Image: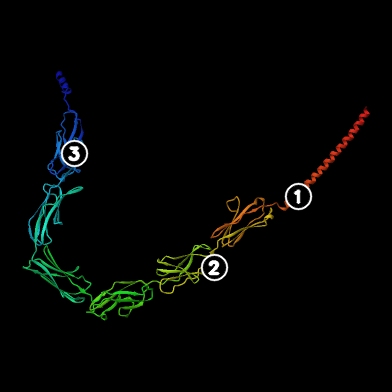
Amino acid sequence: MDLLLLAVLLGSYVRPSRSVDPQPVFTIRDLTLSIEPGADVTRDTNVTLRCRALVSTSGPVVLTREYTISKDGSAIYTKTSLSSEDLLYALPRSRFSNTGRYQCSVRVEDKRRSSPVKKLTVTGLAEPTLQLNKGVVSEGEEITATCSAPGETGSIFFYFYDNSTDVAEQHENSNQTKVKFHLSSVGVHKIHCRYSVLLTPGSQDSKVSNGVVVSVKELPIVPVLEVAPEHQIFEGDPLTVRCYINAQHQLPGGVELYLSQGSRLLSHGAPSINHSMVALAQQPGELECKLEMGNVVKVARKTISVIELFSVPTVSVSPTDVFQRQLMTLTCRSEHVAPERLSREELRYSLVPAEHLLYPRAKGVFTGEALEHHFNYTCAAEAKGIVKHSHTLTVRPKVAVSVPKISVEGRAILGRPVKILCESDSGSPPINYTLLKGNIKLDTVEVRLPSERAVFMVTISSPAEMSRFMCEASNGPKDPPLSRRLNTTVVEPLSDATLTVIPNLSEISEGDHLYLICGVKGSPPITFKWYRSGQATPVHTTMANKNHTDFQIPLLSKDHSGEYHCEAINYANFIHSEPVIIAVRLALWKKALIGCVGLLAASVLVLVCVLCFRAKRGRREAAAELSVKLQALNQMTQ
């Protein structure tokens, strides 16, 4: 029992070993696409696309390969293979539609790789062939044409021609098409076709097909157009027009007639049309009778010449330049009249619209005042029921020029060019402005814009000249209005600047009241400035409405000594005076004080000298006396 339990336990833990296949390892080393026999071939060449995949594996493992061939980015062929051999994709008898950019891609397990793109170019198209269902047709009969492009594939456009004229066009995704069309005229026609293969981004055209001859027979049926009378037709004459069919056999069904004049359809019906009308010179002179029977269209035309009874009137205005509220005359007249049918007395003229506010003065002559705004006039001439209108005449009354105003732009400066302006507040251009000096006309300027002013340049030598200028304005036959005389201030340039000093230069002393007077010739206002040498800024500035003014320095001191000059400025110029040297002398009391002090000092000095002399003399006498005394003493002691 114990042995059996041990055997079971050993069996549960000890199991026979099994071999496990490892996961295959591989890599796609390279993928190439080649075109055989070459990338540029002619049509009908057998082309092969070879896709070669080089795959390396870790052992003899069979891998599934999924190949895809693409053209211009779109997949055209897919194949799954267990073989390592090259994938071959055949293009037998290649066509132009096979031209494109090809690429091969392969997927092995979870790995994918694509080859570089290769371009294949196929040149040449097959010559098209044309077949017609009939060689002889009647006028208007339908023809069926078949055009083929042998062996071609892709998107193809077919074109059909009658000689060099396009007659039909058809698009197909096959190499053959059929179209139906009608030939437009009687006679012999040569039909041919060609085709074009569409291949993005371009296309290639084929040669022209064989030509097939078709004869078109005329139907024995024609339209006839008759007009009565045929000659010497005047405006207003009644006309009888007949449009009918001339047929050798019984008329077939579906025939329709149309009678027209220019773009106006006069009548229609069948088998004949009778139409009455009045001849008018302004209407188109060609009548047309058109027959339509299915696809058959035949036309008869006749031109009628209508003689005018009277010409289209013309309207004119006098005078040519009309002013508001001025009397004007409008004349309406037809230059030519057919004397065989009409006399001038039979013509009647009128103006349109009725509210023209002009009254007739004679036949075709209307008179009245011009309005204050633009107005359109049209003349109507009438005789024997015929009315003709002239072109519209727009009368734009002009505004008479107002009294001009004369002024100066800027400032009038003596001796320099002055710009004089002349302008009117109202008046229709062009306006002629004339500048006068007294009664003498100097110059004339024409102004063509409403906002423009006349400009004159003059130079004056004296202020009195300015008031002699006037200007006149003219834009019509009336006497031109004259402006007032020019009234403006004339600026005289400054000159002769002088700097006057009070008191005299030789009498200037400390404590004096100094006056520096700057005077000039010229027009005020004038700005005066005084400068001292060594200083960039003026020591004093003032403006005066006179030709001179002063700068005062009270209580002069030695510090005020120096070189001075003045400067004057007005609207014309600026000038400066010659410099003046100011030397400030001592005050009189200072001079007297100095003299007194000098005398006192001299007196003290003399006194001191006297005292010193006297003192020196006493010492000499005392010394002599002492010496005598000493000698006597010495003698006594001996």
Tell me which label, 1 or 2, sits earlier in the chain.
2
**What residue sits right under mark 3 in the picture?**
104
Residue 22 at x, y = what percent? 19, 28
- For label 3, the SS is strand
Query: Which quarter of the figure has residue 120?
Result: top left
Q: Residues within 10 Å of mark 2 (few under 14, many from 20)?
A: few
Q: Seen in the image, is 357 located left or right of residue 81?
A: right
Q: Mark 1 points at which residue?
A: 595
Q: Which of marks 2 and 3 is nearer the N terminus?
A: 3
Residue 309 rendering spot, x and y as whole percentages: 23, 76
Is mark 2 in CB contact (under 8 Å) with mark 3?
no
**Residue 424 in view (yes/no):** no
> Residue at position x 12%, y 54% from top?
192
Q: How crowded is mark 1: few (under 14 residues within 10 Å), some or many (20 or more)?
A: few
Mark 2: secondary structure: helix
| Amino acid of disc 2 | Ala
The percent coordinates of residue 609 (x first, y second) are: 81, 42
Marks 3/1: CA–CA distance: 132 Å
Q: Residue at x 54, y 66 (%)?
A: 463
Closer to the eye: label 1 or 2: 2
Q: What residue type is labelled 3?
A: Cys
Marks 3 and 1 close (CB-CB < 8 Å): no
Q: Can residue 400 be seen in this view?
A: yes
3D distance between C-alphas at marks 1 and 2 = 64 Å
Q: Mark 2 points at which residue?
A: 464
Question: Distance between the Cα atoms at labels 2 and 3?
Answer: 106 Å
Residue 340's label in the rendered image is none
